Amino acid sequence: MDRKQFLTIVGRSALFAAAAPALESLAEAARAAPVLDTTQRALLIAFADEIIPATDGMPSASEMGAAVYLERVAATDEAIAASLRDAVTSIDRRARAAHAEAFGRLPAPARIELLQAMEKDEADRFRAARDLVYEAYYTNPLVWKRLGYDFIGAESVGPPLEPFEEELLERVRALPRLYRAVP
Amino acid sequence: MSPASERADVVVIGSGAAGAALTWSLAQNGAKVVCLEQGDWVKRDLMASGRTDFETSQRRGPDSLFPSVRQRPEDYPVVTEGGLRPDQVLMFNGVGGTTVHWEGHFPRMHPSDFRVRSLDGVADDWPLRYEDLERYYDLNDRHIGVSGRAGDPANPPRAERPTPPLPLGARGRTVARGFEKLGWHWWPSDNAILSRDYDGRKACDFRGRCNFGCARRARASTDVTYWPKALRAGAELRTWARVREITVDERGRAKGIVYHDRSGQTHEQLARVVVVCANGVGTPRLLLHSRSRLFPEGLANSSGQVGRNYMAHPSRFVEGVFEDRIDGHVGVTSNPLFSHQFYETDPSRGFVRGYSLVVYGPMGPLSQAWGDVEPVPWGAGHHREMRRRWGHTIGIAVMAEDLPEETNRVTLDPEARDSSGIPAPRVRYAFGKNSLDMLEHGARAARQALEAAGAVQTRDTGGPSVFAHLMGTARMGHDPRRSVVDAWNRAHDVPNLYVVDGSSFTTSAAVNPTSTIGALALRAADGIWERRRDWS
């Protein structure tokens, strides 16, 4: 796969530009020691977009660079690489067994049905892959911004909070002693 | 092995909640104290709390709270069985011990917690009473820097807290509304988190993520509370020192300890008194590994109780989704308020003892998606459900009293070893029926409270988990046949050996243990000092 093909597969929107530095790293990592081959990578993207599709005004997993993130992390963590490969291999096997077709070429209802079956039959494997997609998506600051999550870093100050309101204790203060007497 | 170091008055193993307090107390009295810590000082600017990967850091990598995940050079593997998962044993090896990574909730035990056998006919009474610990609780509170409010009708009267209660935030106010509606008890929590500048430390500024390490030092850990004082008082803290065994002389008295330094070199440290503060898993591991001709079943183990009665606080987590935006992740990670409505035994409930209800919020978006209770579903409805939950979720955790059972125990694993070749601990744990009954009741109560607070939906884990508080494995008691240490944390079998940490708990109570561990440590230090003529 050349760089142009790679970008075509993973770069689906302008939002993805935020992941460009990571993309460069991936391109380098993929050349040196690719975690997934071209087919597997395409499948991972299709899988990620079924887990987190573009709906309700939110971008899909691949639009937020999920596949790039995952391959980058997998390049330095063999357990994650194994999880990704396991999931991709299983999905591919299921797609070809049931439909004689690559997962990414199946119509959406068939893809969803296949993943639902996998979630039931291979719960641990599916959960591991799903959680990785969630990780890729919900560690992205662009997603945080859309959710209204302000990350307060080491050099920042947290939000102001109202001091404790003593008057809230008026009823409880008047309760009889609740702890047991010990002879 | 290198030649033995000069004999210390007291050698302390472990620098956490107990080791730090005890070392400070003895050093300021004038004792020559050497503390051995298998980890290093923590670099606050590298803590996961300040990094955007704070959530993933718990599942992998060197900053996880779980040693089996973390696998730093200073960690030892922990093997689990009986339904307990490796990520249900939580500890940290470094100066400050697990206080580096705790949330800082700082409740005390109730007086009834020390009289479980007498009051409820289960487990055993402690050989001391609440009143024996009270002044040490107070002293420990002052050193740690506790925020809170005196006057709680569910607890004995106590001195006004060193700093006022932390803000409840929207999360706390919402749940308080529920408790108020039901007429239940609630109270602002005692937290080891400063609400005002205190003792040279800054007040909390509500960045959250407390258990990933507090770079500001507002959330107490003993590396920022006791240790600076202990070092000024002349104590010696030796980091990267992994204790292999406690040695004994021909009279059966503790002679000292043998330890490995970072390079693997073996050393001996002689001492008049040895104090083990290595937590409820590390302590029995070390005692069981310290076998000798005089103590073939492990040191201080003539009762066979070393390693038995492991307790971890059974838990159940219930979450409520609210229509209003609450942003439950804002503010301290630990609970701003708690309820002891169901703390004391009520026979009509069908179980003995009781539980705490503690309030929590999600860590961040990823934790919300992964789900403490239930993951956000994948697929077409994912974003709708995530938006419904994120910023709108509050959790109530049920923390149940764990009754001691001999079959829940720490042993030495026959195969797994740490990098120094010392056998790893193997922890077996299964939930008792009383715990499960209590958790069912607690889950219903938590749902009720959340619904009263206005939750439009609630869900719970459905099954039991644990809080990973490590207790009971070298328990305290009057009877040497049924316990390991006496009321002063002194080993029945070895007169100059002390065990001071959660392992000495006779019962678990239904509150976080660290406040009691610190109080026990200060009391034990006084006991050791008062016996100094017997040190020999």
Image (tube, coloured by chain):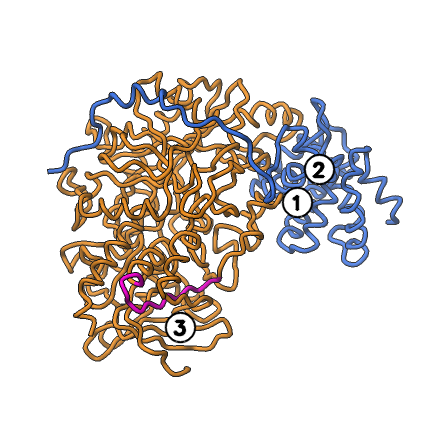
Chain colours: A blue, B orange
The C terminus of chain B - image quarter: bottom left
Residue with the mark numbered 1: A87
The N terminus of chain B - image quarter: bottom left
Identity of the residue furthest to the left in this view: A183
Q: Disc 1 marks which amino acid?
A: Ala
Q: Disc 2 marks which amino acid?
A: Phe
Magenta-drawn stretch contains B29: yes
At a point 18% along the width and 33% down the height, the residue shown is A180
Q: Which mark is residue A47?
A: 2
Mark 3 belongs to chain: B
Mark 1 belongs to chain: A
Residue with the mark numbered 3: B259
Mark 2 belongs to chain: A
Asked if labels 1 and 2 touch by Cβ distance under 8 angstroms, the answer is yes
Measured as percent of width and height from the top left, residue B200 is found at: 44, 48
Q: Indicate which disc, 2 or 1, sits on the residue closer to the N terminus.
A: 2
User: Which stretch appears magenta?
Assistant: B27-40
